[in-house]
Image: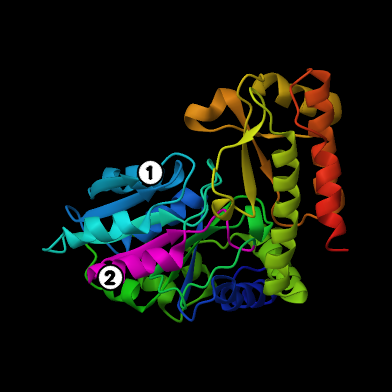
Amino acid sequence: MPNIYAGELVDVSAEVLAELPSIARTSGHAFCTIGNGHSAWQMAICNTLSRGEKVLVLDCGRFAAIWGYLAEASGVEVEVLDSEAGRGVDPAAVTERLSADAQHKIKAILMVHADTASSAVNDLPAIRRAIDDAGHPTLLMVDCIASLGCMPYEMDEWGIDLTVGASQKGLMVPPGLGFVWAGQRAVDAYETAGLRVGYFDWTARMADGPVYSKYGGTPPVSHLFGMQESLRMIAEEGIENVWSRHAVLAGTVHAAVATWSAPGGIDFYVTEPSERAHSVTTVLTNNIDADELRHRCEHGAGVVLGVGIGDRASHSFRIGHMGHTNPPVVLGALATIEAALKSMDAPLGGSGVASAAEAIAQHL
């Protein structure tokens, strides 16, 4: 264990906190909480809202709604605006709802960039325009846990007031750190927030104090070293190149799923191609036993597929293509899935592996 008060760990912490804003493309302040993504949700709620205030949750799958549940448990009034199944949130519906809020009771919007469960993506610049078209002062707060380091995200350019992230997924470090990036309007809201509590409070974390004040106590030693390496890897590749790599690999997975698609068999959950995430793909299995498919892939071939979440649990699976991944990993996973489908005599429209290879070939 290193010295947590001086020396190398202090330098590592300073490097990580200084580099984190570049991942969200913001000049705002980066905060770190020792916990999973839910802890970052809680930090965002506590430092910007007061008991009895109202938020509007824009849900396109599952995780924005869970953020809303956490806000409700904290004493915040929650209203949910659902998207059409398999689609991102309709910006026109946002304008309509905010325009009806003449007294500006809605203090914040809670939403995700890419939903980890449905793999649907929201058009954030369009949502920002929808808010502006309504002339509403609400804060725009976005969960990017499943998109940071995977897809283009421009916090400041897109007018996002607060961003939530976590160390896993595109940032390539095991779960254990939650992040909040706060723009000026979020910091202004913090000044009057009535839900501020000791551990999550930004006061000491913003101050120029000892390293442990940045983490509400003892620093997360191993995770900080991991984040240092992750951020260096991203900087070495270049964030735009990271985004491009993920776009290619996502296109590879999408090509395979499109070719596999057949009546009663494989299909996309997200119906609009432009709204499919570059980090994860949710695949419907319809009449194919998704549990058996996952079992054969994991126990027969060593490939663990993501389980379906929510009401899609029994008839879907998810393919994660995020972070430290490349064509051999993706092609190997797709080939294993196809082999398992064939072993189950599942209906297939064609060889998804062949289509995936063609997709990769266009970029070699």
What residue does disc 1 label?
65
Write the residue at 31% across / 49% down: 71
Using the image as rendered, state which of residue 101 and residue 364 is in the foreground.
Answer: 364
- Residue 181: horizontal and vertical position, in percent? 46, 69
Instruction: Look at the image and say whether residue 131 sits in the magenta stretch.
Output: yes
In the picture, the quarter occupied by the C terminus is: bottom right
Which quadrant of the view contains residue 341?
Answer: top right
Instruction: Look at the image and say whether residue 244 sits in the magenta stretch.
Output: no
Residue 199 in sight from this viewpoint = no
Using the image as rendered, state which of residue 32 and residue 234 is in the foreground.
Answer: 234
Going from the N terminus, do you reach mark 1 or mark 2 first? 1
In the picture, the quarter occupied by the N terminus is: bottom right
Using the image as rendered, state which of residue 261 and residue 296 is in the foreground.
Answer: 261
- Residue 315: horizontal and vertical position, in percent? 59, 25
What residue does disc 2 label?
133
Write the residue at 32% across / 75% down: 185
Which quadrant of the view contains residue 110?
Answer: bottom left
Q: How is the image coloured?
A: rainbow
The image shows residue 165, relative to residue 6, as above or below, that is above
Disc tally is 2
Using the image as rendered, state which of residue 313 and residue 27 is in the foreground.
Answer: 313
Write the residue at 75% across / 54% down: 249
Q: Residues within 10 Å of mark 2 (few under 14, many from 20)?
A: some
- What span is colored magenta in the figure? 123-149
- The residue type indicated by label 1 comes to Ala
The image shows residue 28, relative to residue 339, as above or below, that is below
